[in-house]
Image (tube, rainbow, N blue to C red):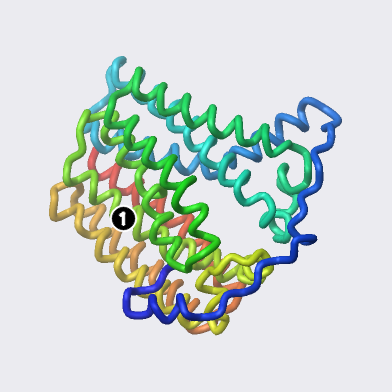
């Protein structure tokens, strides 16, 4: 999932945790929800609003980086349409992800009370909602924003649902695939503002892609028992010692630090950003080294929190320095 090419074949040959029994994977039949407000909360949970919010923040960042100057009325309208279409597509992808993984979610401690495994939403309803939201979101962007934004959003939606989600159940390499749709939102915003993709936009893609490697490795290590229970062959499961995860967290953090300094070479930022990226990257790397030395859920949690601080901080500094 997160290993380098030199270790990939070894990881694939490792024995995977057996899948849960058929009885363990039974998802309870849907039951009526008492109140409309509770029903609404369940559908919002199906959309994974926190993930949608992150997608919208980085999409907004890409748009503002490409816009260069204060937004006029036309650009503000384009931005609002971009955020609406992207939010719908992201919500649809999340709903389909939960639909596909509902049986596995039912045996994981942190996901067993989600609406689908708990039986509060019918699988068919989640499927219809996911397809409808994703299709409408992409179509909305195609009509009101532009072809580039629509195609990038479609690629994000399809690669997340049809590639990353099924690969999670078969290979530790899944994160390398899943990081692609996770890194595309800045390009969606950039293309919506500029009508094209410049090489500078791909630098944002690279930073976002590399950030996800240590971020999700920390999640997988912290919840490794849950993933093992559900039969997901995460790196933290196939290598219970944690050495592989720790190594790739450190190497991923080092690569992220180097990549984060490249925007200066392409005149996307100035000395403020360079100093901020250097300090933030070094601090993030230290958290990764702490995980490598300790390899405990507590240290992994601190690394996870550090990753959640790092991303908005470095993008915020870049945007301020650009303005």
Please state which of residues 91 and 256 is positioned toward the viewer in this rendering.
91
Is residue 33 found left or right of 11 in the rendered image?
Answer: right
Local secondary structure at mark 1 = helix
Is residue 270 found left or right of 276 in the rendered image?
Answer: left
Could you tell me how many numbered marks the image carries?
1
Residue 256 position by quadrant = bottom left
User: Which residue is pictured at 51% across the width and 52% down the height?
Assistant: 165
Residue 169, percent across and down?
Answer: 55, 61
| Residue named by callout 1 | 207
Residue 16 in the image: above or below residue 68: below
Residue 120, percent across and down?
Answer: 77, 39
Residue 62 in the image: above or below residue 274: above
The reply to whether residue 20 is visible in this rendering is yes
User: Which residue is pictured at 22% across the width and 28% down the height?
Assistant: 195
Residue 228 position by quadrant = bottom right
Residue 197, percent across and down?
Answer: 20, 38
Please state which of residues 222 and 282 is positioned toward the viewer in this rendering.
222
User: Which residue is pictured at 40% across the width and 47% down the height?
Assistant: 181
């Amino acid at each position: 999932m997160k290993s380098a090419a030199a270790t990939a074949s070894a990881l694939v040959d490792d024995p995977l945790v057996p899948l849960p029994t058929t009885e363990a994977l039974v998802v309870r039949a849907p039951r009526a929800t008492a109140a409309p407000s509770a029903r609404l909360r369940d559908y919002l949970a199906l959309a994974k609003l926190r993930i949608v919010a992150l997608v919208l923040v980085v999409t907004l960042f890409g748009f503002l980086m490409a816009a260069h100057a204060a937004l006029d009325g036309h650009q503000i309208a384009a931005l609002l349409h971009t955020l609406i279409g992207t939010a719908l597509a992201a919500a649809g992808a999340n709903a389909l992800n939960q639909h596909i993984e509902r049986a596995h979610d039912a045996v994981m401690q942190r996901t067993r009370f989600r609406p689908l495994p708990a039986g509060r939403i019918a699988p068919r309803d989640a499927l219809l909602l996911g397809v409808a939201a994703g299709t409408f979101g992409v179509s909305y962007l195609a009509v009101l924003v532009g072809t580039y934004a629509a195609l990038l959003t479609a690629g994000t939606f399809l690669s997340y649902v049809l590639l990353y989600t099924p690969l999670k159940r078969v290979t530790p390499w899944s994160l390398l695939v899943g990081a692609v749709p996770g890194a595309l939102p800045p390009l969606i915003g950039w293309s919506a503002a500029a009508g094209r993709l410049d090489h500078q936009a791909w630098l944002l893609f690279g930073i976002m892609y590399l950030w996800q490697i240590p971020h999700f490795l920390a999640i997988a290590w912290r919840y490794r028992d849950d993933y093992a229970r559900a039969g997901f062959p995460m790196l933290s499961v196939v290598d219970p010692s944690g050495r592989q995860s720790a190594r790739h967290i450190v190497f991923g953090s080092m690569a992220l630090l180097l990549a984060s300094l490249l925007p200066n070479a392409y005149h996307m930022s100035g000395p403020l950003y360079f100093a901020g990226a250097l300090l933030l990257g070094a601090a993030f790397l230290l958290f990764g080294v702490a995980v490598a030395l300790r390899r405990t859920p507590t240290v992994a949690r601190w690394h996870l929190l550090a990753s959640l601080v790092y991303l908005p901080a470095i993008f915020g500094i870049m945007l301020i320095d650009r303005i």
